Image (cartoon, rainbow, N blue to C red):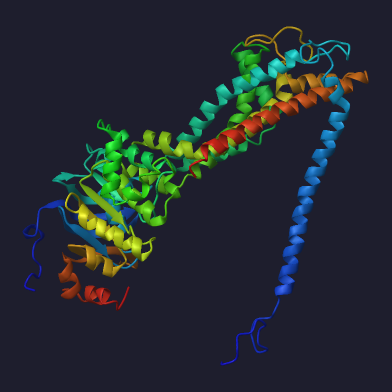
Amino acid sequence: MASPPQISSTPQSIFRPNAKHREAISKIFRIICAIGLGIGLVVLGLLLVDVFQDGFARLWQPGFFTGNASRFAQKAGLRTALLGSVWLLILLLLISVPIGVGAAVYLEEYAPKNRLSQFIEINIANLAGVPSIVYGLLGLGIFNELFGLGPTLLSGALTLSLLILPLIIVASREAIRGVPQSMREASYGLGATKWQTVSNHVLPYAIPGIVTGVIISVSRAVGETAPLIVVGAVGYLTSNPGLLRRFSALPIQIFDWISRPQAAFTNTAAAGIIVLLALLFVMNGTAIYIRNRFSTFR
Amino acid sequence: MQLTHQTSTAQGTSIISTQDVNIFYGSFLAVKQINLDILRNKITAFIGPSGCGKSTLLRAFNRLNDLIVGARVDGTISYKGRNLYAPEIDPVEVRRQIGMVFQRPNPFPKSIYENIAFGARINGYRGDMDELVERSLRQAAIWDEVKDKLKQSGLSLSGGQQQRLCIARAMAVQPEVILMDEPASALDPISTLRIEDLMQELKEQYTIIIVTHNMQQASRVADMTAFFNVELTDGKRSGCLVEYDKTEQIFQNPQQQSTQEYVTGRFG
């Protein structure tokens, strides 16, 4: 009893000294995780290098941003496709954010927790996993035919909105669920109504998470090809897109260029990919900016 | 010490009174058969072992239990003679008059100023907001510490300061009653003493009900003390009110054996 404290266990201890062993496992796990990160980075790096090698020079040739579709690779530009994608982006945000966030707020803050709401919850999660081509067919049936919109930009935007609504709802619900209950209680305790609590405390607290979900979803939609092809986007468009006119979009244009036999179109397609990546990069940057802005008081 | 079982009306006027109150969570009876009168401009302490329904009862007083799915109140809780659970009563209006300070300090992740101004603004306050913010912070004895950083986040304060900010926030809407659910349990002894001193000043204007696990705290601050205990009925545990009297009576001359055992630290 009077002996000084020892670091190593006494022989009769019921604990087996295994610190070295546990430290080793810890180190191995760290290496495995680093390898995982490394593979991701290398693949991404290779992709970027390859695309930039093929397309970077083509990007700066005259007329690439301002030119229309052409059957000559050197003359082909992505003006209509870029305009189409920007249009789609804006329409998507206008259509799907209010509906998606509204649905999420309703489900989390207003809806009673019963069988029906659980059923709806599971179905929304399932919808997020439905292949995009199915949404394309749905859009073709509903917007093109039933509503008579035809193969127009509006129809494409509505179809893509359907595609990303479940993603936005799921992400927004997670963000709203992450708002501490103590904050709602504090607000209600002061005599706030539900709407005052939601608009002043729940939504501002959840906005970083909601924005992240929205941007990831919209980024996915802007890169989608299949549903747009089904509702009638075209890879060869020479007139500016409009709400109720035929339209093109970057992924459609890239797909069109890549499927052409002439070798020179490879470079044009690669340059198109760079533009698409840049668009997504700007969107994600915006998301991070908004997130940081709204987190200042945390 | 002849004051045994004096009726509460002889000691002051009652502001909240309960008649045969049972509170359920779903089919679980959490609190049963509560009859008590809370006296105006007094500090009332609820003491008792964990799980005896003190907080549940407290949160029934400003209808905060409405937020919990399945929570239900039986019997009558009246506030100034009106049944708080009558259908025509708007819980939003109730909470404005019966404020709450929570166990963990929960300032909004907004500026100190905005923490105070929010409640006043949503309730349609038309006076000078700067003046109200200062007055509330002074009442909560925190003005000197925060007057130079009103624009900073409420979360940048220490735990004890955050709790006083929450008290200031509750007072800014000028309630009549302030419910405090173990307001000092997450604080160090010095912050705790500051909050207790504050309560003594506040009772001039407000009626305070405090739930506490700390017996010394109850005996230091409270005028009246209610002792709750857990009772087994049909194998289920529900909270019940054992004894309610003046604080010195509860601590020095309790009528029930279980109160005696609890306040002397022999159980709980």
The answer to whether residue A111 of the structure is visible from this angle is no
The percent coordinates of residue B33 (x first, y second) are 22, 59
The percent coordinates of residue A117 (x first, y second) are 48, 39
The quadrant of the image that shows the C terminus of chain B is bottom left
Of residues A9 and B156, which is closer to you in this image? B156
User: In the picture provided, is B138 more to the left or to the right than B162?
Assistant: left
Q: Quadrant of the rendered structure where residue A289 is? A: top right
Q: Is residue A181 above or below residue A261?
A: below
The answer to whether residue A211 of the structure is visible from this angle is yes
Q: Residue furthest top?
A: A239
Residue at 76%, 20% in the rendered image: A252
Q: Is residue A146 above or below residue B149?
A: above
Q: Quadrant of the rendered structure where residue A12 is? A: bottom right
Residue at 38%, 39% in the rendered image: B114
User: In the picture provided, is B254 more to the left or to the right than A133?
Assistant: left
The percent coordinates of residue B86 (x first, y second) are 21, 41
Q: Is residue A191 above or below residue A238?
A: below
User: In the picture provided, is A297 more to the left or to the right than B188?
Assistant: right
Q: Is residue A229 above or below residue B135?
A: above
Q: Quadrant of the rendered structure where residue B28 is? A: bottom left
Of residues B58 and A138, which is closer to you in this image? B58
